[in-house]
Amino acid sequence: MFGGVHGLIPFPGEHLEGAVFMDIENTTEMQLPSVLPSSSLTMPQWLKLAYGVFFLYLSAQIMIPLPWTPVPISGQTFGVACVALSLGSLATPAVALYWLLGLCGFPVLAGAASGVSPASGYLLGMVLATEVMRRLKAKGFARTWWSNFSVLCAGQVIIFALGILVLSYFVPREKLLMAALWPFIPGDLLKVLAAATVSLHWTRYVDSKDSK
């Protein structure tokens, strides 16, 4: 998955007329979320980050290639879902670092691939979805199995949206949904069901240890 360099992907909307720009000088409270890991992390945090990246790598190697699309069925979305609801503030840095390693040529992506491909939109979606899911959990929206499941479904929508957007530049419109969406829904539903269960039990285990 995601093997081979296919050049830069043109995104629509590079030239926008009448755009509204923020007055940065008057914006005193605007903060961007930290995507890549900070140098101020402690050793246990670095180890947790490494665990997240390694777990993503292992889950990505479970894959089934499909002959009609450059996107295989893989365990990546299961790994992303578990990391998003288990690593707290380190979740997004872990997914971003995993993607960065793949972009730099390390064979960590699905099928031990690396680089940029028409399927790279899914990886970008995974980074953004992880940030959304871990923020929802931080705000208390993932306390039960059903709320976990709902949060993970929201993340899947983001992943598919960006994956389909990028893949649309490489696949004819009439074949796009068959190449980017329909074959993956049953498997992703099973992965979300499993991840909701795993992350809930993990959270309860961590909470029980903290209460002792």
Image (cartoon, rainbow, N blue to C red):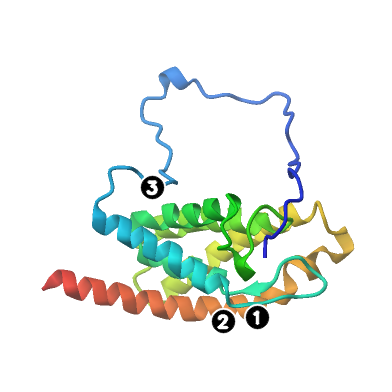
Label 3, label 1: how many angstroms apart (C-alpha)?
33 Å
Residue topped by disc 3:
37
Q: Mark 3 Cα within 10 Å, few/some/many (few <14, many 20+)?
A: some
Q: Residue at x 36, y 76 (%)?
A: 200
Q: Is residue 206 toward the left or the right of residue 97 in the image?
A: left
Q: Residue at x 57, y 24 (%)?
A: 21
Q: Earlier in the sequence, mark 3 or mark 1?
A: 3
Q: Mark 2 Cα within 10 Å, few/some/many (few <14, many 20+)?
A: few
Q: Position of residue 161 (x, y in %)?
A: 66, 57
For marks 3 and 1, give the one nearer the viewer. 3
Residue 139 visible, this orientation = no
Q: Is residue 158 toward the left or the right of residue 140 in the image?
A: right
- Circles 3, 2 touching at the beta carbon (< 8 Å): no
Q: What amino acid is found at the position of numbered circle 2 in the picture?
A: Leu
Q: Mark 1 Cα within 10 Å, few/some/many (few <14, many 20+)?
A: few
Residue topped by disc 1:
186
Q: Position of residue 149 (x, y in %)?
A: 47, 73
- Circles 1, 2 touching at the beta carbon (< 8 Å): yes
Label 1, label 2: how many angstroms apart (C-alpha)?
6 Å
Q: What amino acid is found at the position of numbered circle 1 in the picture?
A: Pro
* Helix, strand or loop under label 2: helix
- Circles 3, 1 touching at the beta carbon (< 8 Å): no
Q: Earlier in the sequence, mark 3 or mark 2?
A: 3
Residue topped by disc 2:
190
